[in-house]
Amino acid sequence: MVDWINSISVDWVLSRRRFYGTEIPLWYCKKCGRTIVPEPGKYYIPWKEKPPIAKCPNCESDEFIGESRIFDTWFDSSNSELYILGYLWNKEFFNKNFPCSLRPQGKEIVRSWLYFTILKSYLLFGKSPFKDIVINYHVTDEKGEKMSKSLGNIIDPQVIIKNFGAETFRMWAFLEGNILSGDVRYSDKRMEASKRFLTKLWNLGRFISSFPVVQKGEMMPAEKWILGELNKLKTM
Ligand SMILES: [Zn+2]
């Protein structure tokens, strides 16, 4: 993210020319061009509504042009931590809990959601909006390609569950899914291997549980050695 910030050479575009979105609450005086900014606390639709003042404070004209553009999506979503903490309507809760403990998010929106949220928080409060951020990578297709509709390489998790079972899916994610170290490649073959591993584990469990539980007894040297190795593994 720091690399990205240092490489920025253009301004952040915060408006969009789309119909749906959060209106930018501004009017412009038709005569002198003065920008009219309303008091906060109300939602305005400037292209449809009149401004909250009758006359331009600069030239006394009573004709205005309402802003027709909307805010960029990231301008809205960069409010997320303010929203969940009740900023402006639950001050006690906000003051007690700001900054947020954790922002979980995907790697592809570091330069949008994460950046804009942090930027806005610094502009408003002079500090970071989160204590920690978890950025996860993606599950890709077998070749490492991002799944997309146009490529037609989307793998539906429901189909995997139907074909291999939910436990196999979990086992695969557990064995291969270190999603913090990079993208994880999905493959049917690897899923099949997870299924076999799970079957072995299941059979092992059934085999062990077929013996009576020993209440009291001496451990053999080999047993001590095995438990020692297990403890070493646990502390790794
Ligand atoms: Zn004016």
Image (cartoon, rainbow, N blue to C red):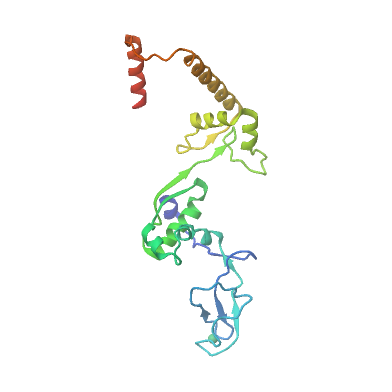
Looking at the rendering, in which quadrant would you find the C terminus? top left
Residue 155 visible within the image: no
Residue at the (45%, 37%) spot, across then down = 181
**Relative to 43, is 129 on the left or the right?**
left
Ligand 1 quadrant assignment:
bottom right
Q: Position of residue 193 (x, y in %)?
A: 56, 23
Q: Position of residue 120 (x, y in %)?
A: 44, 62
Q: Is residue 22 above or below residue 174?
A: below
Please tell me how many numbered marks the rendered image carries.
0
Q: Position of residue 144 (x, y in %)?
A: 56, 35
**Relative to 121, is 70 on the left or the right?**
right
Residue closer to the observer: 125 or 214: 214
Q: Position of residue 192 (x, y in %)?
A: 59, 24
Residue at the (40%, 60%) spot, across then down = 93
Residue at the (35%, 10%) spot, across then down = 222
Residue closer to the observer: 202 or 130: 202
- Residue 218 lies in quadrant: top left
Q: Is residue 104 above or below residue 165?
A: below
Residue closer to the observer: 127 or 213: 213
Q: Is residue 131 above or below residue 165?
A: below
Farthest residue, direction bottom: 60
Residue 70 visible within the image: yes
Residue closer to the observer: 95 or 119: 95
Residue at the (56%, 79%) spot, across then down = 28
